[in-house]
Amino acid sequence: MESNDVRVWGIHTRDDHLFLKTNVIAIGWKKMGDLNTLKGNRESFKEKYFEVYPESSTSSIATSAGMLFRFMHEVQKGDYVIYPSKRDRMVNIGIIEGDYSYHPDAPEYSHQRKVKWIKHMPRTSFSQGALYEIGSALTFFLVKSYAEEFLETLREGNKDLQKIITDENYSIADRADEIIEATRDFVLKELSKNLKGYPLEELVADLLEAMGYKATLLPQGGDHGTDIIAYKDELPPRINVQVKSQSGNISETLIHSLKGAMREGDYGLFITLSDYSKNAQKFLSNNPIIRGINGTELVDLILKYYDRLSEKHKRIIPLKMVYIPVAKSNDD
């Protein structure tokens, strides 16, 4: 994008009054001081950020310093800004009129730019996809996918706005899929980080109970191929469960150890956070009494039965139930 192209930025704040009554946009990180004193490159901003916020993670430094850099150097007078206010749930659209200025006496938001607010519209005026985009977790960000929809509201007549909203079912569905995939990734990362070894076995036993099985967790370290014994009810068949939290793919040899622990009439269940080697997949295919579940399938089961898990495991994997719009079928 050329430097003279008009861009659309998104911003969040906890101070509606500052933005709407004094006609500014602003961001925090007051300890950074006057950004005019820093060299005009991202590395200088990262170095300063690490200096004043030394406890920050590498990713936090990159993200926060990047927002400060963009606010200072990439924003141009004439760019548009979208600000969703929380108090009245309006979408405020403005045009940036001022250069960066530093306000050391400001209680929190010391990095500011003057803005002229030109339209205030209810959230219901916009498509769900556009609302998702400006609901970014970032404080300051570039609006890309739905920038045109916001700009359209500033043009006389807004002739095409309803068409944009009406015809975007598949865009909404795509965004919903992205959210679902992000949730799956989050759960798998939390499992890999916080539930290694025996704690993962405890979670699987809890999950089996949530699914309606009676699960008995065997003593730690004494499994000899079996970590959990499960029954659908008091009667056979018995299900021998082995759980592995290793990062590498499961080999055929490991599944053999589970089969060796099974008695006649037993079924087997092998659960891993990773996946199965080709030989292991072939072995499972040839031995249908043993079911293999990989990390992705385990996450799907956790999401399906999440509300029945113990509070202990809900704290380890904190999730919130939400409703997401999906594309309407042709039959609707």
Image: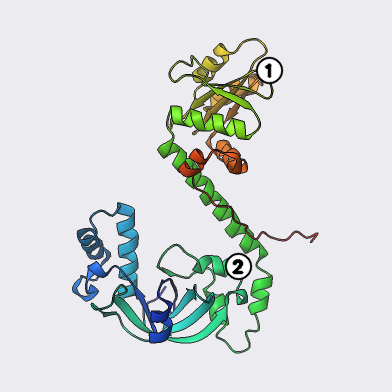
Q: Residue at point 41% right, 80% down?
A: 17
Q: Earlier in the sequence, mark 2 or mark 1?
A: 2
Pointer 1 residue? 237
Q: Residue at point 35% right, 76% down?
A: 26
Report the front residue among 271 and 73. 271
Image quadrant occupied by the N terminus: bottom left
Pointer 2 residue? 128
Tell me which corner region of the image, top left, top right, bottom left or bottom right, holds residue 37.
bottom left
Residue 106: give x, y in percent of width and height. 28, 77
Left or right: 45, with 205 as reference point: left
Mark 1: secondary structure: loop
Does residue 21 lie above or below 179 as drawn? below
Name which residue type carries label 1. Answer: Pro
Mark 2: secondary structure: helix
Does residue 201 lie above or below 262 as drawn? below
Name which residue type carries label 2. Answer: Gln
